[in-house]
Image (tube, helix red, strand yellow):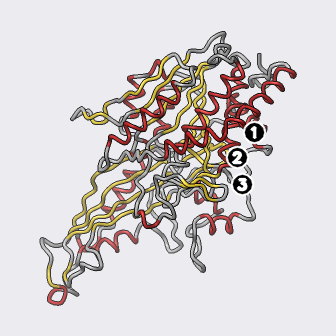
């Protein structure tokens, strides 16, 4: 049964109201245990980068699988790996795959999150140890507390509450199909993701995909992410000399690599900081008109007093609808080790965000062309270790989007915002390619103060509670009606 717009209709009013009340009561009673499950996961240092111990990622996957298996909802719960490097046969990090088949014409929903985390960085920058979850005020601090182990546990809590309402004994009265896919290497580029999709295509097939890996407008207002920028990253090396030379003897005539690199990098932006690379496009999407956007941005981005934003046009369009280029790393002598020499070679890591609507490979070609056209002093350049991820635009006309917005409004008590995100989730393009008919919903448990990837990452516990409620209400709505025609 559906309403006039094709949205899954609510069950009769009495049943729907009773079930919603039961969900709210169940989630409230279980919330302390839910937070405890999250803290247990945060204690596992599941950094997926190659320089870190893979045993921790394996332990994290096992812990996640145990939690989902204990719900009694799923017909199968497995820890699986796929090939990350076809040439070497190297396997990617372990992921968790749990499945339950749909019955009686109900849809199947795929719940995605990732259990791996970013490296902690300098532990001295943390107010409490990164892998010792700590509550201060209304926030839980720790690496992965928000990104994305809270996404994992929000799925877990929603499944538990839903099953409890449909049947006291493991959810046997639940006809909704459920697939849980908890990835283990999202923070390391999802290198085996495409292979994992192909190997498990039948098990992963779904009508709706919920990706719990984004943020919210603020701690009181939910967001449904409808656009994501893509990304292009690579290592750029500039060489000018066969070996280092004395800066006093040859400086002023011999071009050192640092000077050439600085000159080259400066061509990537115009005087106001706007990207100045021909061929990088803008999406032109409309952005909300927020009178507080500048003040909010200055606070959230931690701008120092007197520092102004770069670029032009509405502030949110610069974050959602335009390209950005950042130098995220540099290989050069440290200040402590600096000697009076001309550097023969310098390398940087360049990260570009690509506006929705542009192919990332086209953007890489534009960047390569720009670099080769602007090399100063005849310097030699090399571009290596390239990686691309496609941007994403949500079709907001689907019935699942309408249902999600309804559930968010009910769960949060306010209407959700449709927002773009300046960051990238490249694997969504793989989901679209493999499952073109699935409706993809990008949600999350983060907020502007989360500081994902940074020291003192944290989760607002109120946001966590409301996000879980909204997801459970959405699953309940989908479970109560056949797939819309």
Q: Earlier in the sequence, mark 1 or mark 2?
A: 2
Q: Dot 2 corresponds to which residue?
A: 222
Disc number at residue 58? Answer: none
Relative depth, front residue between 156 and 87: 156
Numbered disc 2: secondary structure: loop
Q: Earlier in the sequence, mark 2 or mark 3?
A: 2
Q: Quadrant of residue 240?
A: bottom left
Q: Is residue 286 above or below residue 97?
A: below
Numbered disc 1: secondary structure: helix
Residue 369: x and y in percent read: 34, 57
* Residue contact between numbered discs 1 and 2, judged by CB atoms under 8 Å: yes
Q: Alpha-carbon neighbours of circle 2 within 10 Å: few (<14), some, or many (≥20)? A: many
Q: Quadrant of the C terminus?
A: top right
Q: Dot 1 corresponds to which residue?
A: 411
Asked if residue 454 lies left or right of residue 234, the reply is right
Query: Do we see residue 388 in this rendering?
Result: no
Q: CA distance from mark 1 to mark 3?
A: 22 Å
Q: CA distance from mark 2 to mark 3?
A: 14 Å
Residue placed farthest to the top in the image? 104
Residue 63: x and y in percent read: 45, 34
Asked if residue 219 lies left or right of residue 112, the reply is right
Q: Earlier in the sequence, mark 1 or mark 3?
A: 3
Residue 6: x and y in percent read: 75, 23
Q: Dot 3 corresponds to which residue?
A: 288
């Amino acid at each position: 049964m559906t309403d006039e717009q094709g949205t899954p209709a609510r069950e009769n009013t009495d049943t729907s109201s009773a079930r919603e009340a039961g969900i709210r009561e169940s989630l409230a009673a279980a919330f302390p245990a839910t937070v405890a499950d999250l803290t247990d996961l945060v204690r596992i240092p599941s950094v997926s980068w190659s320089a870190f111990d893979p045993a921790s990622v394996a332990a994290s996957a096992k812990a996640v699988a145990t939690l989902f298996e204990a719900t009694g909802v799923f017909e199968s719960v497995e820890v699986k790996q796929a090939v990350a490097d076809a040439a070497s046969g190297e396997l990617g990090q372990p992921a968790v795959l749990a499945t339950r088949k749909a019955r009686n014409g109900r849809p199947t929903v795929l719940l995605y999150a990732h259990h791996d985390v970013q490296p902690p960085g300098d532990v001295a920058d943390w107010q409490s140890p990164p892998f010792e979850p700590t509550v201060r005020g209304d926030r839980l601090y720790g690496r992965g507390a928000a990104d994305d182990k809270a996404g994992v546990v929000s799925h877990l809590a929603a499944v538990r509450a839903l099953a409890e309402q449909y049947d006291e004994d493991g959810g046997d009265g639940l006809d909704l199909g459920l697939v849980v896919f908890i990835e283990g290497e999202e923070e390391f580029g999802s290198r085996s993701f495409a292979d994992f999709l192909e190997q498990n295509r039948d098990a992963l097939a779904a009508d709706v995909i919920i990706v719990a890996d984004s943020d919210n407008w603020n701690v009181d207002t939910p967001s449904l992410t409808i656009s994501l920028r893509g990304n292009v990253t690579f290592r750029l090396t500039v060489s000018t000399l066969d070996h280092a030379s004395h800066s006093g003897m040859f400086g002023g005539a011999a071009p050192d690599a640092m000077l050439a690199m600085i000159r080259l990098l400066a061509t990537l932006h115009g005087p106001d900081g706007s990207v100045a690379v021909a061929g990088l496009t803008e999406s032109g999407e409309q952005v909300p008109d927020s009178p507080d956007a500048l003040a909010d941005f200055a606070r959230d981005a931690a701008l120092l007093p007197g520092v102004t934003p770069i670029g032009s046009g509405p502030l949110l369009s610069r974050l959602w609808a335009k390209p950005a280029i950042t130098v995220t790393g540099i290989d050069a002598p440290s200040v402590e080790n600096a000697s009076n020499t001309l550097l023969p070679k310098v390398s940087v890591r360049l990260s570009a965000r690509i506006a929705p609507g542009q192919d990332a490979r086209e953007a890489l070609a534009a960047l390569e062309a720009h670099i080769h056209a602007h090399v100063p002093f005849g310097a030699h350049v090399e571009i290596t270790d390239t990686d691309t991820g496609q941007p994403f635009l949500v079709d907001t006309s689907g019935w699942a989007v309408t249902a999600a917005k309804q559930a968010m409004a009910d769960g949060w008590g306010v209407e959700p915002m449709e927002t773009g995100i300046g960051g990238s989730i490249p694997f969504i393009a793989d989901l679209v390619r493999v499952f073109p008919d699935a409706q993809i919903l990008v949600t999350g448990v983060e907020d502007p103060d989360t500081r994902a990837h940074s020291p003192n990452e944290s989760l607002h516990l109120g946001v966590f509670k409301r996000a879980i409620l909204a997801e459970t209400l959405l699953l309940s709505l989908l479970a109560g009606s056949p797939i819309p025609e």
